[in-house]
Image: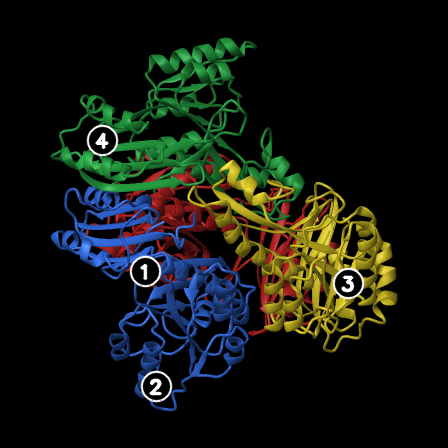
Chain colours: A red, B yellow, C green, D blue
Amino acid sequence: MSPHAPTTGRLLIACPDARGIVAVVAGFIAEHGGNLLHSEQHTDVEHGEFFMRVEFDLAGCDLNQSNFADTWGPVAARYGMQWRAQWGDQIKRIAICVGTQPHCLQDLIWRWQAGDLRIDIPIIISNHTTLEPLARQAGISFQHLPIDGDKPAQEKRIADTLKSVNADTVILARYMQILSGEFLRSIDIPIINIHHSFLPAFAGGDPYRQAYDRGVKIIGATSHYVTEELDAGPIIVQAVIDVSHRHSVADLRRKGRDLERMVLSRAVRRHVEDKLLTSANKTVVFE
Amino acid sequence: MSPHAPTTGRLLIACPDARGIVAVVAGFIAEHGGNLLHSEQHTDVEHGEFFMRVEFDLAGCDLNQSNFADTWGPVAARYGMQWRAQWGDQIKRIAICVGTQPHCLQDLIWRWQAGDLRIDIPIIISNHTTLEPLARQAGISFQHLPIDGDKPAQEKRIADTLKSVNADTVILARYMQILSGEFLRSIDIPIINIHHSFLPAFAGGDPYRQAYDRGVKIIGATSHYVTEELDAGPIIVQAVIDVSHRHSVADLRRKGRDLERMVLSRAVRRHVEDKLLTSANKTVVFE
Amino acid sequence: MSPHAPTTGRLLIACPDARGIVAVVAGFIAEHGGNLLHSEQHTDVEHGEFFMRVEFDLAGCDLNQSNFADTWGPVAARYGMQWRAQWGDQIKRIAICVGTQPHCLQDLIWRWQAGDLRIDIPIIISNHTTLEPLARQAGISFQHLPIDGDKPAQEKRIADTLKSVNADTVILARYMQILSGEFLRSIDIPIINIHHSFLPAFAGGDPYRQAYDRGVKIIGATSHYVTEELDAGPIIVQAVIDVSHRHSVADLRRKGRDLERMVLSRAVRRHVEDKLLTSANKTVVFE
Amino acid sequence: MSPHAPTTGRLLIACPDARGIVAVVAGFIAEHGGNLLHSEQHTDVEHGEFFMRVEFDLAGCDLNQSNFADTWGPVAARYGMQWRAQWGDQIKRIAICVGTQPHCLQDLIWRWQAGDLRIDIPIIISNHTTLEPLARQAGISFQHLPIDGDKPAQEKRIADTLKSVNADTVILARYMQILSGEFLRSIDIPIINIHHSFLPAFAGGDPYRQAYDRGVKIIGATSHYVTEELDAGPIIVQAVIDVSHRHSVADLRRKGRDLERMVLSRAVRRHVEDKLLTSANKTVVFE
């Protein structure tokens, strides 16, 4: 059974460490008829923080989306838990923002079409029209929101669009625009970015040129949640590939494209399967 | 805190899957005053098998090596559990069998000397005397047990030696001899081998020559628990490295040595930290 | 400048080793006004074989496709050279055979559309119709050649099709049919296959199931030239990815798809850029 | 035959690109009876620079260390070449500077003892005495040169020591002191450093703590030639390893040690086998 099956519930918890929390969580699920399929707990002893993810079979379980908050709430309150629950038949609604480069978008569309990513893509948004045909061909709505010299206004239109399609996640698939803190606060849903370098090396613009100029022997890509500080949010996935003096900047870009789409899709998968918690600007990644 | 600290207990469980086991285990530890530091559960839904590892703080916990079997036994019996518990102050007693090649032995000795591997090495056994100086230099007893044309007799002497030093694990650090099923059954403690190929490719003798002749572009090393069938036991760790047509067999051997010692030491670490269960000729590796 | 630019010539040579060959080759190119951009020579001293690849700027060079054989022939004959020359404006004509799985085909089409692979794809051939829409959408001819119980006849039709489109290379992008020696001899052009395992491990059918059953910690993919012996031809590219006990066979297949398309596209790139020589069932890969 | 055999000569060349250089070089070697075993040429077309490395069999060759400069000099002058030649029986004299951490030193000693690195180690220098026993045990001279508050004076003593033992290379095997530009200019021989991060990420002090705080999913190590700008010299080798939220700073350090010694030893090997040229603060690495 996949860790993201329509017949399972998933509960993620972060709270101050205390004795007996695993027993309480596992006991609660068992009492309500849920069989645990995967459970993993991590305690950050340095900071006294407790993290847990459980996935349980919904067959024979009396917990569901409508009764969970009431049932679980008092327990969670006792331990000061931050938590979120996902139910198997819930599918994340992911809006994708793109610029002019197709590879990351195309890869996400492929995986979605192949059934590898169980998501809905209600909208693809771009400040260009370059990728509109790709969206149309896949049968996905495309919204052209040009900047036209007024970025705050454009960001407002993006926020409205996200709201209108009820998106719960945004993927920046090489969107190439810096989003304002105001925008981030206004939408208040997770945003996943792909940066084309091994962060924190080569943050900012044209990282392949930077990597070429520095003469590195390995290039990387980094997917992270977006925060106000550019390229500094919690890292979800990183991967690298060897390069040599024989590679031009164009070669690095070409090789990097493969990395970028691989890294972004892995990050999206982790997000979609509810395997990520963030704490202190880092991710806890459950396997 | 390291996952292998002297102040923690570790419990590993394998049993048929059933509802509520996690709650039972976590509840048991909590009732006895133990705080869970790490817990991970995996259910193999295909085979209906349940695997779990918990690590708990012994401070304030009334469980210990002498009372655990009696206290935990009835619970374990109810679920048909196979289990083993390790207590922080227990240190594995690891005998190392070697041939004439020093690199894997040397690496283990280094890590042991550096405090990276918290183990005792009561004896190094070899059918050659080549590595005796290395053992002596490290202050470790060395037992020369030549085969002298009578392998069963030599294996008997190995078994006696292992027993006399009270070893609980054997590492074959390039021992280069096939051990008989009779020997394996007689000692009945885990044996970890390093095979110098990416198993199941190139099982048997001279795998680097085989790899060279096949013209592979990647070579590997595999550490596994030893079973009666040669090179076919549960795999613990594998790793690989790129090679090219420029590499001679000698180059592959040289590059392979780095892989072998890395892979073997990772496997030993997993074993020493009680992160391994075996089932159906595979390992479950807890993180 | 890319190593595969339309303004360069490429000459590949294999012959018995002899003193002075590099000077002869480099001198010949220089005498004819060609400036060497890349040159690499490898001598297999074990077998006394000499391999060389040179790439030279055609600007100011009086060598070309029509005069080269006559000019170079006598030199090559003196050293018993096997050689082939490629001229910048020649584009390989690559026929792609597929089954029902789209990922490798899709990836090749995409790189071709993005300009990453400078090739012509005159035809996509399949024994199924599943991928016809994908071919059509990309504007590539699709030929459905079902087996219908008579494989020799179908192979004959494939051979005729390859001839009719003047293909110089065949890519088996998960074609999933074993080709007969008769067929291979009849077409006599290079065939590149992608095998979904780390060969020679798990040759034959359903390698992901085999890998799952063996409990390996790494899975791989291998691209190789096809020879009569199944899965035993010269290896061009291999790559691997980590897996764990948590991964089902379906997970291995999913993760493997990423490997397969990456490995196949790298192999095709090496072939297209004339960076491969084969000798003694191995490839010499020039960088 | 190894690319570093006592029976071969090696010539490295960097010069402005010009037509026919490969022919000139190869012709020169051939005229003097040398058979080329490996040759590789790279032209940086962006900067119009030509790089070449040839390795040739000395058997039957009338070139040698004493006549080469006179014979080759006029040819080299014609093309404005920078060049260096190494003769098979020349062995690099490598001084190693260390601090208190043994792993990199130990690894180098080991490879030297195993015959993997064909070098002389005339001296090990440290500002501490911690690693003196390690040096003594290996039979290598150890020079304790404490800083005692006067770094210029200490650097002067290092320079004198290097000169007295006729060192041609310095390895900083976790020396942990920044060397002054004055010192670097005074010794004027290559210095290889290992930095415990994936440069340019986490330059400067305590990179594992920096990596931990940033929450990266991969850590790296970088070996580079030392220049006046800290951690900014030409990169020779880089490698990385995956980490997760489960790893403490101590875990990163432990895992990093394996990377560091691997990366440093690969860099030293490239240097010792005369496979490195530097240009514009980058390395050209011949295979």
The amino acid sitting under disc 3 is Asp
Left or right, B191 with reference to A170: right
Mark 4 Cα shell of 10 Å, populated few (<14), some (14-19), many (≥20):
many
* Real-space CA distance between mark 4 and mark 3, rounded to the nearest whole angstrom: 66 Å
Judge whether B132 appears above or below C125 on screen. below
* Real-space CA distance between mark 2 and mark 4, rounded to the nearest whole angstrom: 59 Å
Q: Share a chain, discs 2 and 4?
A: no
x then y, percent, for residue C201? 58, 37
Q: Are marks 2 and 3 in contact (CB under 8 Å)?
A: no
Work out which quarter of the rendered image holds the C terminus of chain B and state it: bottom right
Of tags 1 and 4, the one toward the viewer is 4
* Real-space CA distance between mark 1 and mark 4, rounded to the nearest whole angstrom: 35 Å
Secondary structure type for disc 1:
loop
Please name the residue shown 58% across and 41% down the image. C251
* Real-space CA distance between mark 2 and mark 3, rounded to the nearest whole angstrom: 51 Å
Of tags 1 and 2, the one toward the viewer is 2
Q: Chain of mark 1?
A: A
x then y, percent, for residue C72? 22, 26
Secondary structure type for disc 2:
helix
Mark 2 Cα shell of 10 Å, populated few (<14), some (14-19), many (≥20):
some
Please name the residue shown 12% across and 52% down the image. D78
x then y, percent, for residue D219? 46, 62
User: A161 or A263, which lies in front?
Assistant: A263
Q: Which residue is mark 1?
A: A202
Q: Which residue is mark 4?
A: C88
Please tell me the numbered disc located at residue B168. 3
Of tags 2 and 4, the one toward the viewer is 2
* Real-space CA distance between mark 1 and mark 2, rounded to the nearest whole angstrom: 36 Å
